[in-house]
Amino acid sequence: MFSIIIPYYNKAKYIQRCIDSVLNQSFTEYEIIIINDGSTDEGLNFLFNVDSDKIRLITQENKGVSEARNTGIKNAKKQFIAFLDADDIWHNNYLESVKYIIDNEKNVKIIGSNYSRKSNFLTANYNKINYFKFDDYFKIAIQNTYFTSSSTIIESSFFEVNNGFNSKLKSGEDSDLWFRVVATGGNAFYIQNTLVYYSDEDENQTTKTKQDLKSTLVGNTNNLYEDILKLKNNKSFTKFVSLYVYFNLYPYFFDKEYNKEAKIVLKQNKIYFFWLHLVYLLPISLGVKLTKSNKNNNIIRLYLKFIIRYFYT
């Protein structure tokens, strides 16, 4: 039923516990696809001592996590594809909980689950699975995207006619996939039980440095979704795309290096939101000073959040 895709690059300290969390699942109809993305450590050597026919190891040159996941998608054989990062852990009822939704709901396209950065919940016993269906995902996604790379499962047929992760994006590539999956139809669900440990233990994981605007989701949003935005009955998604740009573009707009590009991105928005646009009317010199201060930067972000929540959702 499930193809579990695990990209691996120099995670020797964490990979065995990750694999163990899958092998200990209460539901066992799955395959594990590990993509060794040009790793330079020997963290996968323990697999030689693992007695399981469920594991497939694919080795490739280092191409980045998006290409690694795409390799896994291309080699997946099951009806649903689950993503799991090499340093994260699943509760042993994770797959069983997802299966419950698949068995009891119709036209299931994507399922997410609540996660925690603390691992104490892993021993919890859940007598009931609490979940809900998104009636209008894009109405609330600007406040919370819900889906993450280790807590999301997607119906594999999506990838038969759509691209996987966009490897050209260095920021927002995960969100881009979730948005496209939901926007192309089918039902989306979210499990409220905490079933995933999202680790931040690895000191070598990518830092939150500002990426070049051209390699970010916000810098390409309107272009990437041009075909979807042309479709009828997608008012919610069109509104969301414009809100997403307004909410995420300002750090680039008030950066002299990216200001001209950011202005073009803003002009591409389909919908003009007056109260959000006020931020972008600030003089560039003032905006640069404000965004360099963490305190003032947070004030701008809080203002945008407030306006979106109480005026536009």
Image (cartoon, rainbow, N blue to C red):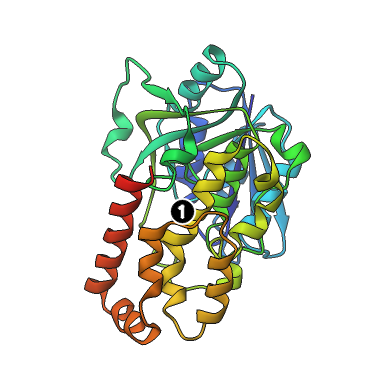
Q: Determine if residue 76 is in view.
A: yes
Amino acid bearing label 1: Leu
Label 1 residue SS: helix
Q: Residue at x 41, y 64 (%)?
A: 277
Would you place residue 55 above or below residue 38 in this image? above
Q: Quadrant of the N terminus?
A: top right
Left or right for 162, reference 201: right
Q: Position of residue 153 (x, y in %)?
A: 56, 34
Q: Closest to the observer: 99 or 8?
A: 99
| 60 left or right of 242 in image | right
Q: Position of residue 301 (x, y in %)?
A: 31, 62
Q: Residue 123 falls in which quadrant of the image?
A: top left
* Residue 154 on image: x %, y %: 60, 34
Q: Which residue is depicted at the point 41% across and 28% down?
A: 191
Q: Nearer the viewer, residue 80 or 211?
A: 211
Q: Residue placed at 56% from the left, 64% from the top? A: 41
Left or right of 44 in this view: 207: left
Residue lying farthest top?
104
Report the number of discs: 1
Q: Nearer the viewer, residue 120 or 237?
A: 237
Viewer-closest of 281 and 295: 281
Residue 276: x percent and y percent?
A: 38, 60
Above or below residue 84? Residue 168 is below
Dividing the image into 4 quarters, which one contains the C terminus? top left
Residue wearing tag 1: 243
Asked if one can make out residue 202 in the rendered structure from this viewpoint, the answer is no
In the picture shown, does residue 57 fall above or below 9?
A: above
